[in-house]
Amino acid sequence: MRKTYLLLMMVVALVIVFAPVSYANEAPKGGKSMEAIEINHVPQNYLQAVSEENRGQFKEVAYPVYNYINISRQFVTNQEISEEEVGRDVVEGDPINKTVFIYLPPGYDEEDTETKYDVLYLLHGVGGGRYEWPGGSGHSGGNYVIGNIFDNLIANGEIEPLIVVFPEGRSSHDWTDRSFNPSKTNILGFYYFDYELRHDLIPFVESNYNTYADINNESAEAIAYNRQHRAIAGLSMGGMQALNLTLNGYRHDSESFTGTASNLGNGLVPTVQANGMQDLFAYVGAFSNAPTSSDGKTLGKGINSSPYKIDLLYITCGDADGIAMHSYRTAIQGLKAEAQDNLGAYYQVVMKRRGHDFSVWNNGAYNFARLVFDNAQVDESDTVSITLD
């Protein structure tokens, strides 16, 4: 009897050890209902630094980029991508080196590969770069204010520790040029950043940091799992990128090269639609999205046409924003009707008497971070329209 019992225990142990991994059962989270998470202003104390031991750390890292716009306005790639898809000549070329700024949460240990993290990609504006989010609100207590916000959210248990990536959003040979001239390639690079994300930056992040997602696993089960552990949002031009490049909006180019006049008054005209990145991201945020953002019907159709549901779309703007309030209204108009059931939680947040600045953008990052990665669990599609005084 004892031998039989021991044999049975050995079989059970082997089953446990060699059982296949189920993505659906990893990283369980409690979640809160939408009603339990109130959309509000960033608490003033969240702008202040936490104790040293509870602070995250910022790192600057270089990585190679194989997918970008070259000096001749051609698209350089190491992938099988057609000229029809990108709307321009496709060529081979040497990689360029870019730099990314990364927030690692308190307690992050690169040697602790058993502890995994969600990743939020925060995109900058037309005149910014990787330092715009960290430096835009300055410092408090010897730390970036955006770092303080994430540190406080984590310390108070409102969100799980996460990695935040601040990229350079121009996928072009002249990515360090922050000037605005619609005929320059640095501006064109904004509209091709999705290829760099998919083929260069995300693979770099997920190969070098302890993330839940692994883009190298291309099984259907892994794709469905991975997108639940990535989120993308941006301010101004970055908000446009989050919408257009994720939800099948339009790329833009200079009217000097397209031969058609700009209706926006900024010298940029739509060209071809992006393929979308809903297979990469389940959560999308746009804070004061730029004038080249596609209209709501286009974005909604993009959402509806994907086999992957957008679990959260969060769009916000200040009502005194002379740059983006029109494009905010245009982007939300008709979006839900076109997206139908392929859109989950949908937030439209207007901030009264706020302009095109970090009072809106920090608030967007604060509320968006509280809603993503199953912090809020929504069983059915809901639209929440809020005005913050």
Image: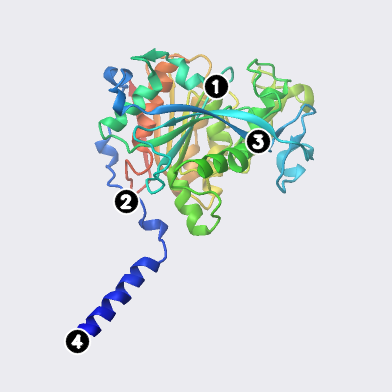
| Residue drawn at 30 percent across, 73 percent down | 12
Q: Which residue is mark 2?
A: 28
| Residue 111 location, quadrant | top left
Residue ID for mark 3: 65
| Amino acid type, callout 2 | Pro
Instruction: Characterize the local packing of mark 3: few (<14), some (14-19) or many (20 or more) Cα atoms within 10 angstroms.
Output: many
> Mark 4 or 2, which is nearer the eye?
4
Q: Label 4 amino acid?
A: Met
State which tag comes first along the sequence, 3 or 1.
3
Asked if residue 305 shows in the view, the reply is yes
Which residue in the structure is indicated by mark 1? 125
Q: Is residue 75 above or below residue 25?
A: above
The answer to whether any part of residue 309 appears in the image is no
Q: Earlier in the sequence, mark 1 or mark 2?
A: 2
Pointers 3 and 1 in contact (C-beta within 8 Å): no
Identify the element where label 4 is drawn: loop
Label at residue 1? 4
Of residues 56 and 293, the one nearer the viewer is 56
- The kind of residue tagged 3 is Val
Callouts 1 and 2 close, C-beta under 8 Å: no
**Mark 1 vs 4: CB contact within 8 A:** no
Residue 205 percent coordinates (x, y): 52, 39
Q: Outermost residue toward the bottom?
A: 1
Task: Looking at the picture, tell me which residue is in the foreground, 96 or 75.
Answer: 96
Neighbour class for label 4 at 10 Å: few (<14), some, many (≥20)? few
